[in-house]
Image (cartoon, grey):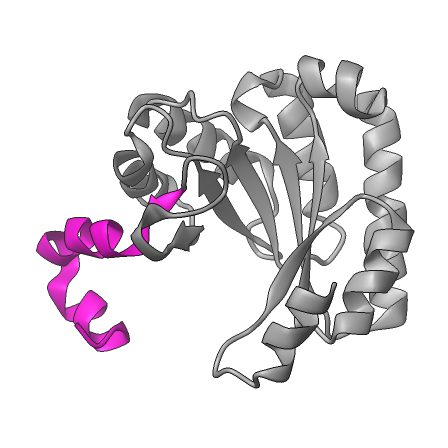
Amino acid sequence: FEDIKSIVDMKLNSKILTHVRCHKVDVDRAIETGVDGIDIVIGTSSYLRQFSHGKSIEEIKKMAKSVIQYIQSKDENMEIRFSTEDSFRSDINDLMDIYSFVSELDIARVGIADTVGIAAPDQVYKLVSQVQSAINTDKCDIEIHLHNDTGCAIANAYMAIKAGAKYIDTCVLGIGERNGIVPLGGFLSRMIPINKEYVTSKYKL
């Protein structure tokens, strides 16, 4: 809480978002920090549903709607993302059901997470494409969160963009979040040969 509030108080030239569990008490604490957006996260794989929260897919959908509408009632300008955790070990039909459902709830984007870093580039392309087809793209976009356990994070990020994702979670030098996620520098290096003008117009390289 104090760390997030300190970052918000720095008045950086950027939006500050924070992750919360799919619980209203977490939302209240997040709003207190003054963040610009809230990323709701809940596990959808059979592993996390059994060992993390014990909820069914229908229960997850009800929780999602309740928490999303709660945020909207508190602050209609709050940016909201709803993300499934452990997406690549989740049942594809369950994922499509959830993403299709939440995409109609006036959120900014849905999130896909390779929580344990097992995804390969072809799997990323396929899943992002499927999500793109399942959601209401007139209402929300796709974000993806990729861990680097097998060294595929940059390649996976590139394939996610090709498949239709608009937001890639990155970090400086790939540091943090267990063994790291997509390193911003490496990702930009991958994207420059593809669209140099666009990348250099957004970043001072």
Residue drawn at point x = 68 percent, y = 21 percent: 94
Q: Nearer the viewer, residue 172 or 59?
A: 172
**Residue nearer the viewer, 175 or 145:** 175
The vertical placement of 119 against 8, above or below, is above
**14 in magenta:** no
- Number of dots carrying numbers: 0
Quadrant of the drawing holding the C terminus: bottom left
Residue 97: x percent and y percent? 70, 28
Main SS class of the magenta portion in the image: helix
Q: Report whether 34 appears left or right of 173.
A: right
Residue 198 part of the magenta segment:
yes
Task: Write the residue at 38% across / 26% down.
Answer: 149
Q: Position of residue 136 (x, y in %)?
A: 61, 47
Image point (47%, 83%), residue name: 13
Q: In which quadrant is the N terminus drawn?
A: bottom right
Which one is nearer the viewer's eye here, 200 or 18? 18
Please report the residue visible at 22 percent of the width from the left and 50 percent of the height from the top: 186
The region drawn magenta spans: 181-205
- Residue 202 placed where, x, y %? 27, 74
Task: Identify the image quadrant of residue 172.
Answer: bottom left
Task: Return the x and y of residue 143 as percentages of the image width and height.
Answer: 50, 48
Q: Quadrant of residue 95?
A: top right
* Residue 168 visible from this viewpoint: no
Q: Is residue 13 visible?
A: yes
